[in-house]
Image (cartoon, helix red, strand yellow):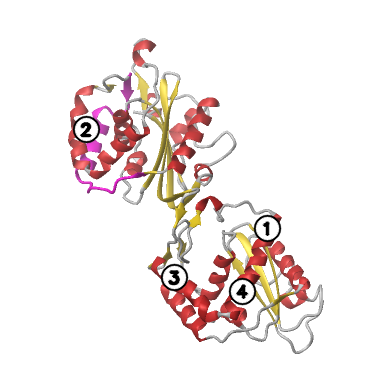
Amino acid sequence: MTFAISCALGVAALPWLWAVLAGAPTSPASLPFRPALGAPASVLLAQAVPISTDAILAEMNRLRQNPAAYADWLERTRGYYNGAILSWPGEARLQTVEGTLGLEDAIAVLRRTPPLPPLRLSAGLSQAADDHAKDLIQTNRFSAQGSDGSTAEQRATRYGIFEGRFQELVSQGLRDPAAIVASLVIDDGNINRNYRRALLDPDYQYLGVRCLPQGNLSLCVTNFAMLYTDAGQTVATPFGEPAVTGDNPFTQPLTPEVLATLATGIIAETNAVRTNPAGYAAKLEALRPYYQGNLVKIPGQPTVETVEGVAALDEAIAALKAAPPAPSLRIAQGLNRGAADHANDIGPRGVTGHYGRDGSVPLERAQRYGTVPPGNLLGENVSFGPPTLAEWHVIQLIVDDDFPSRGHREAMLRPRYQWVGSACAPHAVFRIVCVVTYASAYEE
């Protein structure tokens, strides 16, 4: 009953749609609906008018909060069908693929669907939807991809941070909010019913939608997300300070200046741990409420999956409380340069570990630019992850999840170390790699 694109992360668009977009010939079964044959265009399609976002949200929540009652209402639309022709009041006559079979299937599914939580309207997701709807109209296209090559995920992250699954629907056709939602629920001609599944997905909590006129039709873009924090929204953090998500350290462009600031910040944060480990334990304790099994869900940040869950965090807290203070580390430029060599080596290749492409080890890289006197110690930590937050990388090394030896934590707290160097670079898989090199003595 609507032309539609479903764009979910990891989910391909429907084959029939791409055939249409490519200009391939179509058969009656190729499209979810077709205008009724033989009728004048003035009868089939009336001028589209802007559609209320609030009205669409209300219809979707009417569906979700009481699916059985919605099924009763949908049953009353059976009279709009005449065989395969659907004549929705005030709308163009449409030729469906399934006739009332799609309607009956939707009603049966809704009668056995339990009530679902209502969707919350997100300004950021709505703005992303608005961007894409306007782009499609201006470029006369019908696609999940923006004219600038952007994906639905990229458009959503312009205006905030989403966590978990995310999905975008693009539909074109009916104008009445009730008809738009009903057509997506019925999902005529779509054997997978993936549009209906999105509307009835209990995990989706946030919605962004924009419907705009397009000639004699209306085009709607709808975004669903499990969790979404709008840019500029102040959210609580586990450290007792408010955070403004407009900073968006998880998507911030990785300029040389940003990466240099991150590397310097990691050294400062490391010294905060070393000089007052018991005090730093309080930061880790503040994280505890955000563990849900093996998942860590911090407001404004993507969910992190751990191996050990809260047990590794608790062990790290105990270790910090028991650790004596250690001297603050001094920066050695030669160690910075050796760390940069390794970060810039493994980052573009998307690999991990302490061996360079040339087989070099940390001591060899450090001694390219200085000397570690005999009898002294040198160690290296490598952190991987998306944010430009020094605290995030340091806590990751302290907790040392899935490393039974806790070697990263031990290296960071080792009292004999006096010198440090750090460098960060873009990473092809994890977005950022940061290398930290420690030495008990170092001569430039």
Distance in Å between CA atoms under marks 4 and 3? 18 Å
Depth order, front residue of 426/333: 333
Mark 2 crowd level (few <14, some 14–19, many ≥20, 10 Å Cα): some
Position of 392 compared to 103: left or right?
right
Residue 352 position in % (x across, y down): 62, 67
Q: Earlier in the sequence, mark 2 or mark 4?
A: 2
- For the point 54% across and 80% down, the residue is 277
Q: Which residue is mark 2?
A: 74
Quarter that holds the C terminus = bottom right
Of labels 2 and 3, the one closer to you: 3
Position of 236 compared to 369: left or right?
left
Q: Which residue is mark 3?
A: 286
Q: Which residue is mark 1?
A: 348
Q: Which residue is mark 4?
A: 270
Position of 32 compared to 153: left or right?
left
Q: Earlier in the sequence, mark 4 or mark 1?
A: 4
| Residue 174 vertical position relative to residue 439 in the rendered view, above or below | above
Quarter that holds the N terminus = top left
Contact? badges 1 and 3 (CB < 8 Å): no
Q: Disc 4 residue type?
A: Thr
Asked if the magenta segment contains residue 100, the reply would be yes
Instruction: Indicate which disc residue 189 carries.
Output: none
Residue 263 position in % (x across, y down): 66, 65
- Label 4: state its secondary structure: helix
Distance in Å between CA atoms under marks 2 and 4? 61 Å
Write the start and end of the magenta stretch as one range.
92-120
Count the labels in the image. 4
Q: Disc 1 residue type?
A: Pro
